[in-house]
Image (tube, rainbow, N blue to C red):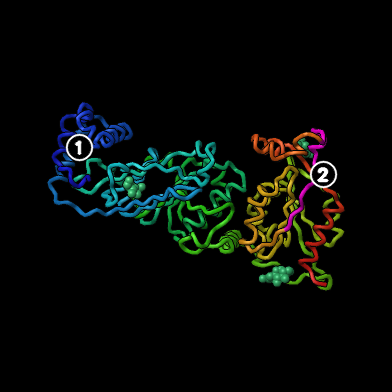
Amino acid sequence: MWLLLPPVLVLIVLKTGFLPQVAHFRETGFTKVADEMVHKVSTFGLGGATWQQQSHDTVKREAAKDVSAPISKLTCNFNNAHSDICTMEGDLRVHGKSATVYVVSASTFRPENSSIKVQPYTRKWEKETMSRIREVTMRSVPPAPYSFTIPPRCTVRHDVPAVVFSTGGCGTNFFHAMSDLIVPLYITAHEYSGRVQLLITDYEPKWVAKFRPILAALSMYPVIDLDADTAVRCFPSARVGLESHRMLGIDPGLSRNGYTMMGFRDFLRSTFSLQRPWTTPVISRSTGRKPRLVMVLRRHSRAITNEADAISSMVDLGFEVVAAGPEDASDMDQFAGVVNSCDVMVGVHGAGLTNMVFLPHNATVVQIIPWGEMKVACRYDFGDPVPDMGLRYAEYEVTAEETTLNEKYPRDHPVFTDPASLHRQGKLWEIFLQGQNVTLDIGRFRGVMQHVYQSITTD
Ligand SMILES: *[C@@H]1O[C@H](CO)[C@@H](O)[C@H](O)[C@H]1NC(C)=O
Ligand SMILES: *[C@@H]1O[C@H](CO)[C@@H](O)[C@H](O)[C@H]1NC(C)=O
Ligand SMILES: *[C@@H]1O[C@H](CO)[C@@H](O)[C@H](O)[C@H]1NC(C)=O
């Protein structure tokens, strides 16, 4: 439709001062375009007069030329349940401070979506999280002579693709960092073999510091804090938003490059120089090597009140046990090595179990599921992702006798008789995740761990 509009009409709009003209062109679809021009002026802080002069000249100049060939393309996918993603190539100009990507001389330009907004985080369904994510605007500019928006001039030119994403959604929670960002980043950016520029909106310095080794393995350039960036950076191609398929997982069928979680774990192993790709195939009493087990401990909630007894029961069975509290796990670089040296990981449901990504292939993960009909939710986060990682899975479900909720609620309370009703009231987090510790039934726990021991040893 825009192709039919004569450039002369554009000239009139600009020349006579566009604000009073808006009403006249309301039916023609120009209102939106004029609004955008107003926005642009304020964004760049140019004086109105200067701007009008400039745009007037540019339009005249461009109108005088023959129709120049479109060079940019923009495609967006809003159908994914986890994230919206826009992919573009051609003449792309990123202005960080205004969170705008100009898609210059775009063959895909349509007046109705000349401005497309995306929040580059991967939990689209979660309103509260998404409310903290900045919108990035893709502003399409049609080819000359119809380009009445003047894209800003490049101040920095990059010859590699850009990937734009937000770190505003996960704080330092290790599960969310991995599941919402690191795995999606791997799916989106690993294919460039380091020749890619990462741009981060809602820049979290702590997050960036913690994951620097992984960011450096994905990109050979320092990351850019998009929101603070006053430059206009030009790129030949860009992606805004990260691809995400499932919790802590990759669907090879959806990945352009057929990526897998096994491949992702190999990538981590090389990033952290981990020694063991696989668990030692045969661990036996006769070789004298004990299977090594890391117990991931929590402190403030879902703690194991009798953790010393639990540990000695596993030592009795023949495991070499490494007990790791949150303070041990917080140094990712070092803890990755500890985890990789182990054959088994045990822990109560919680972000610490995410460290399973560093286990050698064919290792076993044992998830302790807290009281409160939590099985489905716990499996969703840490059970279902395990097989694709090339790991084995076992679980131990805590009974009503083993939870400290006993001390707070009588046994005829819905906490015990109908936990699901409390989930429906939105109290799952408060009561069952934040509100309990567990006291393991050592006999029953030992039975489960004995089974694990037998499954990874001969004789
Ligand atoms: C722009 O809108 C058209 C029609 O409404 C749609 O087919 C197209 O996919 C949109 N383009 C983008 C990049 O969203
Ligand atoms: C769990 O145990 C920790 C440490 O022993 C304690 O600080 C915390 O208050 C307990 N939480 C609950 C919900 O009982
Ligand atoms: C994984 O471990 C199990 C038990 O030790 C063993 O039977 C199996 O062969 C191992 N798989 C591979 C691929 O090494």
Amino acid at pointer 1: Gln
> Which residue lies under the disc numbered 1?
54
Q: Are marks 2 and 1 in contact (CB under 8 Å)?
A: no
- The one nearer the camera, 205 or 432, is 432
Q: Residues under labels 2 and 1: Cα distance?
A: 74 Å
* Relative image position of residue 322 (x, y in whole percent): 77, 55
Q: Nearer the viewer, residue 302 or 320?
A: 302
Counting from the top left corner in percent of width and height, residue 125 is at: 52, 43
What residue is rendered at 45% in x and 39% in y? 134
- Looking at the image, residue 217 sits to the left or right of residue 352; the answer is left
What crowding class fits label 2: few (fewer than 14 Cα within 10 Å), some (14-19), or many (20 or more)? some
The span shown in magenta is 394-411
Q: State yes or no: residue 404 in magenta.
A: yes
- The quadrant in which the C terminus is found is bottom right
Residue 269 placement: quadrant: bottom right
Q: Is residue 173 covered in magenta?
A: no
| Left or right: 415 in relation to 123 | right
Q: Quadrant of the N terminus?
A: top left
Residue 90 percent coordinates (x, y):
31, 54
Residue found at the very far top of the displayed protein? 20
Q: Secondary structure at mark 2?
A: helix
Along the line of sight, which residue is nearer the eye, 85 or 175? Answer: 85
At label 2, the amino acid type is: Glu
Task: Identify whether 374 is placed above or below 288.
Answer: above
Q: Tell me which numbered mark, 2 or 1, is placed earlier along the sequence.
A: 1
User: Can residue 78 be spotted in the picture?
Assistant: yes
Residue 439: x and y in percent read: 82, 44
Rendered residue at 44%/60% (across/down) = 192
**Depicted 320 relative to depicted 326: above or below:** below
Tag 2 residue: 402
